[in-house]
Amino acid sequence: MRRIGSSIMILTLALVYAPAPGQDLQTLVPHALQFAQQQLRQSVLEIGDSARFARSSQSDGSWKTTPARDWTSGFFPGALWYMYEYTNDPFFKKSAEKWTAGMVEQQFDRGTHDLGFKIFCSYGTGNRLSPSEEYQKVIVQAAKTLSGRFNPVVGCIKSWDNRKWVYPVIVDNMMNLELLFWAAEHGGPKELREIAVKHAETTMKNHFRADGGSYHVLSYDTTNGSILVRNTHQGYADESVWARGQAWAIYGFTMTYRFTKDPRFLATAQRAADYYLQRLPADHVPYWDFQAPEIPNEPRDVSAAAITASALFELSSYVKTEKQKEEYLRHAKNILRSLCAAPYLAEGTASHAVLNHATGSKPANSEVDVSIIYADYYFIEAMLRYLKLGK
Ligand code: GLY
C-alpha cells in the first residue's frame, strides 16, 4: 500500500514538474537545472571516491567511472562547480573541491593534449568561482606541461602518442588552447599565448574544407611541417564531418577570438557554425556525423548539440551585425529548447546523468547512444550562459 502511495506521489511530482511541450526557455531552463541538480547530487553520493570520475552511463543507467588520467575526468568536477555557481549550495562547493583535488597530479601529465579539458574545466572553473593561489599554480603548471607538446616546425601541439599517425593533430585540440591563453595572462610565460595562436592559425589553415566543414585528424611531417594525411578517427569517413569535431571547432575558434580579438578566428568560428547549423535535423540535435550513411536511422550526438549551444551564446556576443547576433541566439535557444525536454533530458529514464543520446565513438562502437559527462557539462554551461543573458 505504501508502495502504491509513493508511486502515486512520484507520478504526481512528475506531472507537476514535467515541462509541457512548447514551454518557453524561461520555464524549461530552471526546470532542467533543477533536474541536473538532483542528478549531480545523487552522482556525488553514488561515486563517493574522489579518485573516480563519472564518464558515461551503463545499461542500468549508473555511471561508468574513470580514473583522473582519462581525458574526461575534469568534466565531473567542472559540472559540480557550475552547479555551485547556480545554487550557491555548500554541498556542491565541497564536492567540486573534493573531485578537483582528485586531479592534482594531472598537471604533470605530458602524455596528452587533453590537459586543457582536464585542468581548465576543473581547476579553471573552480578558480573563477573560488579563486586561490593553489588553483592558479596548478593551472599555470598544466599549461607549461601542455606546451611541451608543441612542435614549432609543424606549428601545432601534438594530440596523441603511440597511434598510427606520425604527428596527429585533431580538431578537438582547439579546446585545449583556453588553458594556454589563460595561463599566459595569469603569471605563466608569454610563449604560452604564442603557441596557442600558432596552433589556431595552423588549424584554421589546414583543418577546414572550402564549405567550412572540418577534418578530424591531420598528421604532419615533423621535418618540414607538410601535411601527410587527412583522416578521421571518430567520424564516418575521412571526407565526412564528425558532428562533435565540428562543435569543438565552433567553440574552440570562438574562445580563441575571445582571447585574441583576431577577426580571422571569428570568421573561422562563423564558417564552422554556419556549416553545422545548415545541416541540422528538425529538432536541432545532430546525428553523430553529418554524412552518416543511414540518416535518419543513425544515433544522435547530444554532446555536439550542448557544446554548440554554449559556443553560440558566446559567438552571438562577438558578431558584427544585429542580424547575425539574433540568428546565432535563435539557434542556441532552439538547441536548448530541445535539450531541456524528452527524449534528450534524462528525466524519467534510468540514466543517472542529465542528458541522454550522446555518442562517443560510433566507429569503435564505444559509448553509442548513452549519457556522457561532457554533454552534461556543456549543457549546464549553456544554460548558465542563457540565464546570464537575462532574456
Ligand atoms: N576529444 C575526444 C572526443 O571528443 O571524443
Image (cartoon, rainbow, N blue to C red):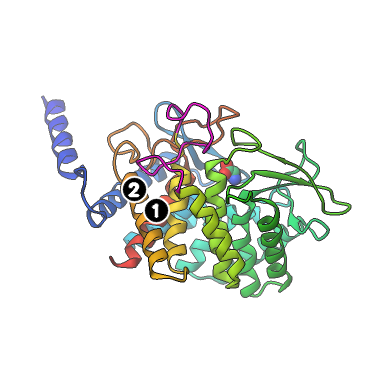
Question: Looking at the picture, how far across and down is residue 339, in whole percent?
Answer: 35, 45
The label number, if any, that marks residue 20 in the structure image: none
Visible residue check, residue 92: no
Mark 1 nearby-residue class (10 Å; few <14, some 14–19, many ≥20): many
Residue numbers of the magenta segment: 278-299
Q: Secondary structure at mark 1?
A: helix
Task: Please tell me whether the stretch drawn in magenta is mainly helix, strand or loop.
Answer: loop
Q: Amino acid at mark 1?
A: Ile
The image quadrant of residue 351 is top left
Are the residues flagged by discs 1 and 2 in contact, CB closer than 8 Å? yes
Write the residue at 45% across / 67% down: 129
> Is 285 rendered above or below residue 34?
above
Q: State the separation of the CA atoms marked 1 and 2.
A: 8 Å
Q: Quadrant of the N terminus?
A: top left
Residue identified by numbered label 1: 380
Q: Image point 13% across, 37% down: which residue?
A: 12
Q: Amino acid at mark 2?
A: Ala
Answer with left or right where residue 253 lies relative to residue 9. Answer: right
Of the 4 image quadrants, the one containing the C terminus is bottom left
| Disc 2 secondary structure class | helix
Tell me which residue sits at (42%, 46%) in the image: 376
Q: Name the outermost residue toward the right.
A: 223
* The magenta stretch spans residue 280: yes
Along the viewing direction, whichever of 285 and 143 lies nearer the viewer: 285
Question: Pointer 2: what residue?
Answer: 36
Q: Is residue 265 left or right of residue 220?
A: left
Q: Earlier in the sequence, mark 1 or mark 2?
A: 2
- How far across and how far down the image is residue 364, in percent? 60, 29
Where's ligand 1: which quadrant? top right
Answer with left or right where residue 19 lies relative to residue 38. left
Corner quadrant of residue 69: top right
Ligand 1 lies under 8 Å from the Cβ of mark 2: no
